Image (spheres, coloured by chain):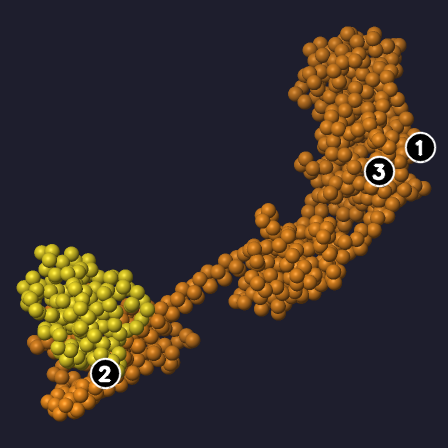
Amino acid sequence: MSSRSIPTHLSSCEEEEIARPDFVQPHGLLLVMSPDDLTIRRVSSNAEQFLDKAPEEVIGRRLSEFLEKENFEALTKLLNTDAPMYSNPLTIAVSREGLVEYYDGLAHQRDGFIILEIETREDGSVPDAASGRSIEHHFRLTSATLGAIRQASTLTEAAFITCQEMRQFTGYDRVMFYLFAEDGHGEVIAEDKRADLESFAGLHYPASDIPDVAKRLYVRNPVRLVHDVEAEPAQIVPHGESLDMTFCALRAVSPFHIQYLKNMGVASTMSVSLIEGDNLWGLLACHHYDGPHLVPCSSRVSCVHFGMVVSAQIRAMMEGIAARELAERKAKVSGEIEVLSVSLKLDETIKERPESLLSICEADGLAFLSNESLYLHGETPSDEEVRELWSEAFDSRNEENIVIYDSISESFPHFHPGGSDVAGALMIRCSTEWGFIFFRREHRSEVRWGGNPKGNVTQGSGLSPRNSFDEWVESVKGHSRPWSRVDSEIARELHGALMAFVMQQTVQLERLNEELTAKNREVQQFAYSVSHDLKSPLVTINGWVGALEEDLASGDEADIDQALSRIKNAVSRMGRLIEDLLAFSKIGRVRGTIESIDVDDLLNGLKAELQLRLESEGFSLTIDPDLPPIRGYPMEIRRAFENLISNALKYGSSEEDSRIHISGRKSAGGARYSVRDFGEGIHPDYQKRIFELFQRLDQSQSGTGVGLATVTKIVQLHRGHCGVESAPGEGAEFWIELKNLPLNLK
Amino acid sequence: MSEPGLVKFLLVEDDDDHAMLAERAIKKARIVNRIDRARDGVEAMQYLRGEGEHAGQPLPNIVLLDLNLPKKSGLEVLAEIRADERLKGIPVVILTTSGDEQDIADAYGNNVNSYLRKPVDFEQFHQMVNDLCLYWGVWNQSPSGEGEK
């Protein structure tokens, strides 16, 4: 028997070495057989203990030679099924000197061989009774525990119940519920133990205590028994290619781990994996101190089931707790988001209610960055430090929009928030210069380690397992209370809502911008027209005054009358222009109240007022009866009709026909009215232009070019359209289509 | 071919007063011996293209063009002149009350020969019209209007 040495380094073949030690724990026998005829190819060196024969006497012989005939047939039948492993444990009956002895057997296929492990049965009892008892046992264990866990209100309580039940079932001195944190280190969150033992509850263990390779094996083979740390392992003979023992219960323990257990004072252990998917999230770790302790195969199978059921139950419970917390927090967030989303000025709204924002993220301080400005509230670093932190956390390489630091100084060693007590930050970015930072104060805490986690393995040039498990208290500085998964969920919610808000703001801003651009264009056009058209009569007046002076000086009196009358005309034209412009500029600015307007009344009143002018210019105005009413600004509507009639009077006469006719009909949401004349008509090329300010088709007439522009503006005020239908020589029909305005419109 | 010795201006102006005052000033300069007037952009183009009553009309030595015109704006008239193979060589001088930057830019963008703002002051107006007649009617050499035909 060769002895095994402690490796002096851990390398990539570490996993290989752990899974393929080629040694077994000596409390059982391992047989490697060809699958076809179950000829024994290799055997563990402790064969004699179970079969009364030395390994060399066993190798090359068939398994049937050692088993009771009936038992062997049952075994071969089982091995021929698709998944023999699920039939474990088997009862193995071995004839020894005429007596039959019963063992637990574990069979599986690996590396093209049948591997059969045989373990001493606790009491050597007969098969039927044994299995019956174990099933009953198993049921009691799981159902009782599940019932109790369901009653538990906290994780710790559920874990404690699990430990209690497990210890009662297996008989170990101590059973611990070991929970892995995200960084891989573990914490004993609950334990049940012999009263005289010192408590490990609340102790933390470094991630290096259970390396990743070991974790992977725990996932694949969820129960691991170390029967006796003092036992000398038995080698599998003859030497050959090392066997993959991933699924072997008897797989020898690495010398490194044996030493670790010895250092801890443990004599015998068992671990049951708590797995979700492929994730090992916890272990039920059992210790025995006074000597070897054997949990028989059938009970271990129960433990595996127990682990699976408990794992599912407790994970569901943990998720339930998290989901409840998340729901509560989300409710708060959505209330807050509602307030923010109706706000038009986000920065002002935030400044009004920083405390409620702090409370939804359970933070002590808040920074709100919007473009160039920075708003700070509560416990925060300085203005400059916050900006520095922002640009470092969201530098060009970082595509994440949410970053979380429990310890800012650990991530940015040169960052020292001088005046403040801030340690943690949760940062939400909506754009490069737009977002939130929530800060948390430093939360000084103490972590109780089961031995100094930093002084564990390195001694001299090689590796050796740590030998001190004395409680070692680390005081943790520079950290905040950690941001939880719920916190980051909340941050994501907030980010989504803020992005939506920003988008909406952008759209709104764009619309306002467009409106402003349009207004600006209108104002520019107005100013242009005003400067041009108001200046024109000035040029005229000055021109004629100059001419008049010249003529008077030269004694030429022929044109004096003409000059004077032209000056008078220009002055009165200018007066009209100013009046019209003033009226035009008032539209939509000085509004009356919105009323339901009886258009019949309105037009008949207007006709009466215009009667003299109509008669003197030889026009007849006819109005259809029962015109539809409209809801709008009465003064403006009246002015629109006045301008249309006046337009017809100025331009709409012809020698044959001087009629003006007004008609109307209902239209979608309002009404459409037409003023028809029978004058020269308007060429299609100019039909659009005439509605613009100061555009006239005929300079000889008395118009100022403001009338139809005024109509257009009034129609726009009533959310409608206007236009003209005409052909040269056929008169023109000017129409306006108006919408009913809501009575309460502001 | 234009008549020898004839200096003819086309005045495109919708405002009767402005037209009369301009004519008066032009006449006073005693350089131009014929002024024809168009009252809007459409009439101006008909005149220049010799359409209808304007058939056989020799091209003017210069077009004095207002910007704000009914039916077709001064800038449109300018663009049409410059796009017309027969007309594009005619000197065009804008004479307007507008001092709008965009108008000036648009006019030069359409290769206007000169852009003049009507001064409100009578003396200045006369001085400007006098100089204009002297420059375009005497000193300046324009291509013969009918050359390409």
**Where in the figure is residue A729, as x and y percent of width and height?**
11, 69
Badge 3 local density, few (<14 within 10 Å), some, or many (20+)?
some
Q: Which chain contains the residue that carries disc 3? A: A
Badge 2 local density, few (<14 within 10 Å), some, or many (20+)?
many
**Where in the figure is residue A632, as x and y percent of width and height?**
34, 76
Say which mark, if any, is on residue B122: 2
Depicted A684 relative to depicted A654: above or below: above
Say which mark, if any, is on residue A290: 1
Residue A437 or A181: which is nearer the viewer? A437
Q: Secondary structure at mark 1?
A: loop
Residue A355 or A710: which is nearer the viewer? A710
Do labels 2 and 1 touch, CB within 8 Å?
A: no
Say which mark, if any, is on residue A467: none
Identified at 80% across, 12% down, the residue is A238
Cα separation, mark 1 vs mark 3, equals 25 Å
Q: Secondary structure at mark 2?
A: helix
Q: Secondary structure at mark 3?
A: loop
- Amino acid beneath label 1: Asp
Badge 1 local density, few (<14 within 10 Å), some, or many (20+)?
few
Q: Colour of chain B?
A: yellow
